[in-house]
Image (cartoon, grey):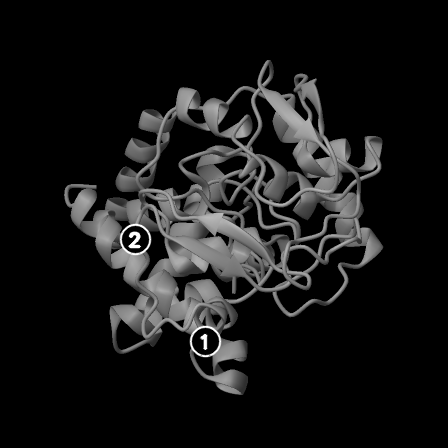
Amino acid sequence: MTRTTRTRRVPGRSGRATLGALVALAVVVTAGAPSVITVRPGDTLWDLAREHGTTVSSLRRLNDLPGNGTLYAGSTLRVGSGSSTGSSGGSGSYVVRRGDTLSEIAVRFGTTSAAIRKANRMSSSTVYAGRRLSIPGAGSGTSSVPSTNAGKRIPEPVRRSVAQNRATLAARSHPSKPQVRRMVAATARRHGVSPSLAVAVAYHESGFQQRVVSGVNAIGVMQVLPATGRVIARQHGRSLDLLKTQDNITAGVLLLRQLQRSTPTTDRLLAGYYQGAGSIARQGILPQTRDYIRSISILRKRFANG
């Protein structure tokens, strides 16, 4: 299993300019007039939330950030107070943008696809650009502690490791996105995994960005948890440093290969990568996992040649 909460890039959006522009977009839910700051090299949402007495979820909502919350030095960021309130009993709203999926919107606001569907009386998980969605509970979060989709608090050692890994990766140079895409495709071919599958997963997970670290410490291009990386390394008798781009890609691809050999269908493979076999055994395939599977299927067409 790679993680419980994922940081991921929204399909259909690429390029530094796009993300930089998204940072300064209009307020969705706010509590008073926000101030504007300029992002410095190495800044993370978690650090800025702590520095300005607010929360990561509030910064995401206030700036309509994409799912992985990536920041770029020189971009502007609206910073409000730590307690956001919505217009209807703790709910906020969000206008769907081109390329959004319901599962990504749910992750962005710390809720579930099922909750959003219920709040908006949706018969399916399909969303269309321009539609305004009611986001249940989006205005009620006040804790600066990152949480999983299940609302569990992240242990302090994990939070420290997240901060350390983000700082380490922020201080390093990394391959460009086109280079990462080629690396993922080549690694997939080397290990007998479909290049289109591996590349689609890498894009959905991180937008081909090695510096991305989720709130539960899923690291890099393939968003692999340290514990998963250690298991993969032991199984294959090799050393894997998830903070190194190629090692991270290798870990993710080897996990895909392992799932490919142990699951009967590609959908079950993707469910295992996203949700984890243990969670599937306990809860079955969750609605957000099915959304993930659909998103990867669409992306595979885009990256048909890897």
Q: Which mark is residue 31?
A: none
Residue 28 spot, x, y in % from top left: 57, 43
Q: Residue furthest front?
A: 87
Above-or-below relation of 231 to 66: below
Q: Quadrant of residue 12?
A: top left
| Residue visible at 50% across and 45% down in the picture | 67
Above-or-below relation of 114 to 91: below
| Residue visible at 27% across and 40% down in the picture | 185
Of marks 1 and 2, which one's residue comes earlier in the chain?
A: 2
| Residue visible at 27% across and 38% down in the picture | 186
Q: Amino acid at mark 1?
A: Leu
Residue in front for this viewpoint, 282 or 244 = 282
Q: Amino acid at mark 2?
A: Tyr
Residue in front for this viewpoint, 75 or 14 = 75
Total residue callouts: 2
Above-or-below relation of 65 to 76: below
Left or right of residue 140: residue 219: left
Q: Quadrant of the C terminus?
A: top left
Mark 1 or mark 2: which is in front? 2
Residue count near mark 2 (Cα–Cα under 10 Å), binned few <14, some 14–19, many ≥20: some
Q: Which mark is residue 286?
A: 1
Left or right of residue 192: residue 131: right
Q: Secondary structure at mark 1?
A: loop
